[in-house]
Image (cartoon, rainbow, N blue to C red):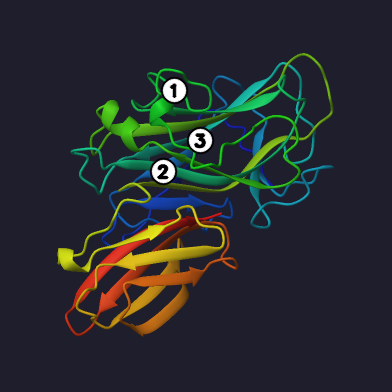
Amino acid sequence: MYKLTLPLFLLFFSYNSFTQDAPFFEIDFEGGYVHSASDSAIWHLNIDTTSNPNNIWQIGSPQKIVFDSAYSIPNAIVTDTINSYPVNDTSSFTVQYIISGVSINGPYLSLLMIGEYSVDSDTLLDYGKIEFSPNNGISWIDLLYDTTYSNLINFGGQYPILTGNSNGWKQFFIELTPLGVALGLQSGDTTLWRFSFISDGINTNKDGLMYDNLYFENSHPIGLIEISMDDKFSSSCFPNPATNLLTIELNNRSSLPFDLAIYDNLGRKVHGSNFIIDEKIEIDVRDFKNGIYHYTLFCPTQNLRSNGKFIKN
């Protein structure tokens, strides 16, 4: 366990390219579970000790009454890994993310965040906030309670309730597909995601809030049909998110033989099928862990490829 207490202390990560897709990364707070599909994507995490020198956010192994385990062991980011949260406190950490790797012309940019959270607080009086800044902190949008842009924010049925008791880890999903276009975001713009926890003057001796496995991506929207170099070999998948069965539909009127591979967001292959000639495939995803998955359909005889992605919840 360790605590970031130095003013302006910054955790900075950079990484190398391993595919040609849009940039993405995941933070599991273990120091090695980060990756990107573009070496031009740069991000860093900052626990803000400037506005609050006693910032209670810590990275480490939770050792409290309710918070006794990270989602991916051993570490998470917690409102103090040992002590209950104090009264009259507002503590925040931010993730800075520079948009890169995709064209943002038209309504096809997706700013996506998925993560795990656990909360134990005084209901409604002590609560968490998630905010987004399109301009490196000049202005902020409250993603959970904003009324101006609420119709441009998609929670995909996984709305985070950051107060009360979540009774364990819950997944949340936030996609800002049309919001990025509405705000005029461009490649190279610096965006910020701010995670806060706010307490009132009543001491309830509760554990607070913690996050783990925070995944960020700027790319094409979840659910958008992915087109191959040959538009006669396009595909789509549904339902998205998927819980039990995922259906992949492929424009394959010529009954070309193709292979299917599904990868998790670490690039590990979790499913494979060969010599498929159908136009519809059903995959049982009940044993998949929650998160984002990418699939590839490849026809070796014609060198055709179609890609897509889906969320398992």
**Residue 2: quarter of image:** top right
Q: Earlier in the sequence, mark 3 or mark 1?
A: 3
Circle 3 SS class: strand
Density class for disc 3 (Cα within 10 Å; few <14, some 14-19, many ≥20) is: some
Q: Earlier in the sequence, mark 1 or mark 2?
A: 2
What numbered label is drawn on residue 211? none
Residue at the spot x=26%, y=67% of the render?
Answer: 306
Q: Is residue 75 something one can see in this rendering?
A: yes
Badge 2 density bin: few <14, some 14–19, many ≥20, Cα 10 Å: many
Compared with residue 101, is residue 155 higher up or lower down, i.e. above or below? Answer: above
User: Real-space Cα distance between discs 3 and 2?
Assistant: 19 Å
Q: Which is nearer the N-term, disc 3 or disc 2?
A: 3
Mark 2 sits on what residue?
112
Of discs 3 and 1, which sits in the foreground? 1
Residue under pointer 1: 141
Measured from the top left, where is residue 24 in percent x and y?
A: 38, 51
| Secondary structure category for the residue under label 1 | strand
113 up-or-down from 91: above or below: below
Nearest-to-viewer mark from 3 and 2: 2
Looking at the figure, which quarter contains the C terminus?
bottom right
Mark 3 sits on what residue? 46
User: Real-space Cα distance between discs 1 and 2?
Assistant: 15 Å
Q: Is residue 24 left or right of residue 143?
A: left
What's the residue type where badge 3 is placed?
Asn
